[in-house]
Image (spheres, rainbow, N blue to C red):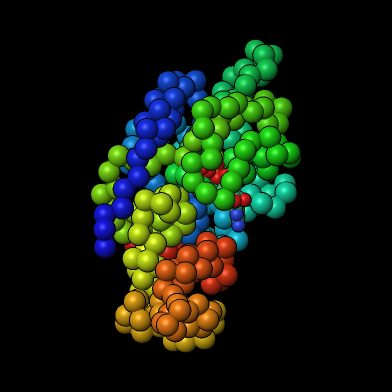
Amino acid sequence: MAVINWYPGHMTKSIRMIEENIRLIDVLIYVLDARAPKSCINPDFARYIEKLPVVYVLNKSDLADDEETLKWAKFLSGVKSEAVVVNSTVSKSTASVLSIIKKLCGEKIRKYALKNVRTTIKAMVIGVPNTGKSTLINNLLGKAKAVTGNKPGVTRGKQWFRVGEYVEVLDTPGTLYPKLNDQVSARHLAYLGSIKDEVVDTFELSVQLLSELALMKPEAVSIRYGFSPSDSGEKDLEQVALSRSFLLKGGAPDVERASVALLDDFRKGRLGKITLDKADEA
Ligand SMILES: Nc1nc2c(ncn2[C@@H]2O[C@H](COP(=O)(O)OP(=O)(O)OP(=O)(O)O)[C@@H](O)[C@H]2O)c(=O)[nH]1
Ligand SMILES: [Mg+2]
């Protein structure tokens, strides 16, 4: 399959903005898509993780396998980090993020409290595109102030929000990294909609997704489309087209249309709760 890569100019700019603001930051809110946490980890952010406490948000947990999500939460929690399982589309479901921030930044809060000075904890939300960073901020705010959207690259520029008594949060645009060396992760990001559909071959991507589902969770395919997946993703995509009655003029299966429908089904959870990256393999 063709190499997947997406690093437009606005991401270079966003990384520069993150770099310029990082010295102000007390804690990172690292938003990962619970369906593929490993693929959402940007190696370029390793240098920030080393220095700052991190709240890992396993977001979109409503679309991921619950057992796997718990394993990931355990894996990502450590001395300076803690993971929370969240569905940002359900109101008030992100309160745990604030309590963990308070815990991780407890020392600073206590230090200022001793001097009777009210401090502000500054948090920065980071993550690959479309993981729900702005939706999470709106959830923390209790109102829709940050712009969100069902495609990657919605947030541009920087925006600070005051959430709670003494926490300020900086929303940042989703960023990838110049070279997606791990093409398995690149594919997973593309399935999730973190890579712009226009820069990937949707047909090839769907064939790959069907091949992965055949190994990982064949029942997801059989329940939705009524056939058992084979060892050929291409043949399976034809089956998807037939099951949806997507036919070309001569009666041949319209695989292009089927590939768009398949990706949409996966992204919206119509194939069930599926986790692509396994915690045991991390
Ligand atoms: N099912 C589900 N959908 C979510 C969740 N959080 C966000 N979304 C949806 O995911 C899409 C992307 O959300 P955004 O908040 O715009 O994502 P973002 O990370 O800010 O995206 P960029 O600014 O493009 O990097 C929107 O359609 C949201 O409604 C969640 O927990 N569950
Ligand atoms: Mg955003």
Quadrant of the frame with the C terminus: bottom left
Compared with 276, 195 (above or below) is above
Q: Residue furthest front?
A: 249
Q: Where in the figure is residue 132, as x and y percent of width and height? A: 56, 46
In the picture, measured across the screen, residue 87 lies left or right of residue 241, that is right
Foreground residue, 46 or 170?
170
Quadrant assignment for ligand 2: top right
At a point 44% along the width and 84% down the height, the residue shown is 251
Compared with 278, 78 (above or below) is above
Instruction: Evaluate whether residue 218 shows in this view.
Output: no
How many numbered callouts?
Answer: 0
Quadrant of the frame with the N terminus: bottom left
Instruction: Evaluate whether residue 199 shows in this view.
Output: yes
Compared with 8, 213 (above or below) is below
In the picture, measured across the screen, residue 164 lies left or right of residue 76, that is right
In the picture, measured across the screen, residue 179 lies left or right of residue 130, that is left
Q: Where in the figure is residue 275, as x and y percent of width and height? A: 47, 64
Foreground residue, 48 or 270?
270
Q: Where in the figure is residue 211, as x and y percent of width and height? A: 35, 74
At a point 39% along the width and 62% down the height, the residue shown is 202
**What is the quadrant of residue 237 in the picture?**
bottom left
At a point 64% along the width and 28% down the height, the residue shown is 161
At a point 66% along the width and 51% down the height, the residue shown is 89
**What is the quadrant of residue 273 in the picture?**
bottom right
